[in-house]
Image (cartoon, helix red, strand yellow):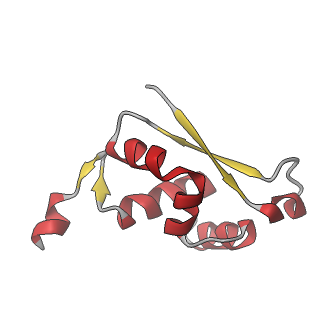
Amino acid sequence: MKRAYISLYYKDMCDFGKAKPYLTVVIDPETKLGKVCKRLGGSGIKRLIKCATYKLLKEKASKENRTINNFIRHVLLNKLKISNGKTNTASRTGL
């Protein structure tokens, strides 16, 4: 499996003991999600997940008992109506 790495910049990450203010999201570039995320870039992904700070991202992921990377993927899949790398046809047809 190939991997694509997209960096999200969070100025407040250093407040949580992180050495650098970048969060790396790992996505398979051959899936629909990977192709969309590549076009969006880090700032586009941040806008979609609606987490302007690392603190907020960490809190939201924790509330759903997910890792940060898993939370980001989950939100993106839901917002973009993508399921298992393919377009979610059920959501478009109302099923």
Q: Is residue 5 left or right of residue 18?
A: left
Where residue 57 appears, x then y in whole percent? Answer: 65, 68
Compared to 24, does 13 lie above or below?
Answer: below
Q: Is residue 15 visible?
A: yes
Q: Is residue 10 left or right of residue 6?
A: right
Where residue 24 appears, x then y in whole percent? Answer: 65, 45
Q: Residue at 16% of width from left, 67% of height from top? A: 92
Q: Residue at 43% of width from left, 35% of height from top? A: 29
Q: Residue at 85% of width from left, 61% of height from top? A: 16
Q: Residue at 30% of width from left, 56% of height from top? A: 82
Q: Nearer the viewer, residue 4 or 68?
A: 4
Location of residue 95 (image quadrant): bottom left
Q: In this view, does 31 lie to the left or right of 74?
A: left
The total number of labels drawn is: 0
Compared to 55, does 89 lie above or below?
Answer: above
Q: Nearer the viewer, residue 63 or 85?
A: 85
Q: Can residue 95 be seen in this view?
A: no
Where residue 62 appears, x then y in whole percent? Answer: 64, 68
Where residue 80 appears, x then y in whole percent? Answer: 35, 61
Compared to 19, does 43 lie above or below?
Answer: below
Q: Which of 70 and 43 is in front in this view?
A: 43
The N terminus is located in which quarter?
Answer: top left
Location of residue 17 (image quadrant): bottom right
Location of residue 55 (image quadrant): bottom right
